Image: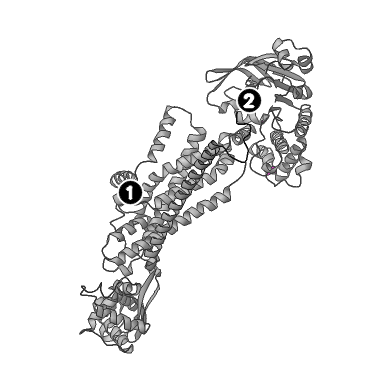
Amino acid sequence: MSAPNKSLFTPGPRTRARNRAEARFRASGLAAILAALAFLTGLMGIILHDGAPAFRQAFVTLTVELPEERLDPNGNRDPADLARVTTFKYAPLLDAALLRALEEAGAENPFAKAKKLRALLSKGAPAQLRARVLAEPELIGGSLTMRFLASARADGYLKGRVTRESLARERKFTPAHLDVADALLGSGLLESRFNLAFLTGSDASESRPEAAGIGTAALGSLAMMLVVLALALPIGVAASVYLEEFAPQNRLTDLIEVNIANLAAVPSIVFGILGLALFIQFAGLPQSAPLVGGLVLTLMTLPTIIISTRAALRAVPPSIREAALGVGASRMQTVFHHVLPLAMPGILTGTIIGLAQALGETAPLLLIGMIGFVATNPPASPAEAFLAPNSAMPAQIYEWARRADPAWYERAWGGIILLIGFLLAMNLAAILLRRRFERRW
Amino acid sequence: MNNCSQDTKVTAKNVNVWYGDNHAIKDVSVDISDRMVTAFIGPSGCGKSTFLRCLNRMNDTIPTCRVEGELCLDGEDIHDARVDPVELRARVGMVFQKPNPFPKSIYENVAYGPRIHGLARSRAELDEIVEKSLRRAALWDEVKDRLQAPGTGLSGGQQQRLCIARAVATGPEVLLMDEPASALDPIATAQIEELIDELGRSIAVVIVTHSMQQAARVSQRTAFFHLGDLVEYGETDQIFTNPADSRTEAYITGRIG
């Protein structure tokens, strides 16, 4: 066969060619992994870089005088009378406070009117002050030191997004405002702090990006996920167990199987329009409600859960079923005592992956009215969390990304960080549950 | 309604089994006696395991499998509509070729059968059943200090004895063993054989085996299957020393199979 004088130390040409092919294959595999890693780190880097500023927010600490003749002309602290005083009466108090703060900082008001200074504060600042005074009427007549939200422009200046050049053509917020901001920065009254309101708050109107938060939308997402979990897991597991362990093998079950596999590949927007027709138009459930969103996402998640559950059930060795049947367990006992516990890690992993998919789903929400809607208040009760109109995290992010002000753009990225955080947490839970339930056989 | 005889434990009359179109068992009639070890021997694919699985209706779980003929336990037709296979399997236990303990503790493996059949009224009674079963399976001394350890952590031979303990825990009258020692080393095999011998004194044991020596060692009666036919059935000594059929002789002398 081979030449008799051939040495083991010099590989033949075929072997060398094979080794070269293998080296090429390894190199391309390594390159693929490196490319994937590069994409991933690039993506994560961009998201973190653009989104991290959303978690910090500029605040102005002001000492506001609260004159009685202005806020409570009758002097009786009657809540009804107090409530009649609108934010228009409060705004000048803030102007005055700003002016005083400037004087203390040793700077001059560059504007003819004190009113112009107001652009440094959020448009919601007077309402913030009014709410505080209405809650504590005894403050009237004295003075109050309080932290107010700075405007998105002032906030952007601290984050480097807003510069003197970029303000050249603006009228309401001018480079002169930045001089004031510098003076307030110098005296420590203007500062950037961690923004808890971004995590807990609701969406705000288009002109107040600084006041917007994703908390309410996150509650909407949570409510939807609870609906999905409560419906998709039991229905999916029951359907899979029946199909896998009890159903006879015939045309009908084959048809069902093929259709479930097909359903998993149906675009999510189709489920959205189905939900619109079925749950809103036919069943008359409220529009934009997380309950409906949850139902639609349940439809979407079911095939995923059924497919992974069946795979997990099939992975349980038949010898375990035989063993159980052999000692006289009924089929149901066999399934519930032996097969399901062994399939649990696979079922849970599939469920959590299905949930994670559902959490990030935007398209079906478009059709059931969870995207255009802006919830400005968190739900008041658990029932409202499911039935009152709300949005969801991906829908909220989409909404923010559409808005013009760059401050919204930053919020959208911040929202994405949170969404990814949730997804990572869910995947981590899947891994931990897998570890926890995993058994050898 | 039935013409099963009463003097033997299990009676099979004209049993036919099909897997789809494959005629796996052809017209087999066998009487299996109580308190005796009966061995089924024959080459691979001869239907001996299939026939064994008919005796506790394990073939019910295979959708394409069809069983015809009469099979009686103590004179009662096991395919009668009134028979619940669950009750049947509690009385006709089974040990499989590959040790298949549940991935639970040793204790739970043995206690599972008595528990689902409600054989123990208290924890103490259950403990007693578990101990008795493990002793019958000659495993008690090896595991008594680690009953809560996983059954899958035992060695292959111990696992198989655990499966035997699990099978005898429900107090079966018949024990079916499908090549119980084929996955084990010679020492473990010897232990299992000793056990079979012991069990055969109190209940009917039916063992399927590839090994003719094993059949000769442990059984009192032997049935030789070939291509789905029951070729010969009789006293083990007679089958091995003086077979009536030429195919039996060919098999035991190593010319077929």
Q: Is A361 a magenta residue?
A: no
Query: Is circle 2 on the same chain as circle 1?
Result: no
Residue A380 visible from this viewpoint? no
Residue that badge 1 annotates: A364
Q: Relative to B224, is A402 on the left or the right?
A: left
Judge by depth and name the residue closer to the eye, A129 or A43: A43
> Chief secondary structure of the magenta span?
loop
Q: Chain of mark 1?
A: A
Judge by depth and name the residue closer to the eye, A79 or B200: B200
Which residue type does callout 2 highlight?
Arg
On screen, residue A376 above or below A256: below
Name the element at disc 2.
helix
On screen, residue B175 above or below B21: below
Q: Is B99 a magenta residue?
A: yes
Colour convention of the picture: one colour
Q: Residue at x 75, y 41 (%)?
A: B131
Q: Quadrant of residue A330?
A: top right
Residue A74 spot, x, y in % from top left: 26, 84
Residue that badge 2 annotates: B53
Residue A52 visible from this viewpoint? yes
Q: Residue at x 31, y 64 (%)?
A: A408
Q: Residues within 10 Å of mark 1 (few under 14, many from 20)?
A: many
| Magenta stretch, residue numbers | B97-106
Instruction: Give the CA separation, mark 2 to mark 1.
Output: 52 Å
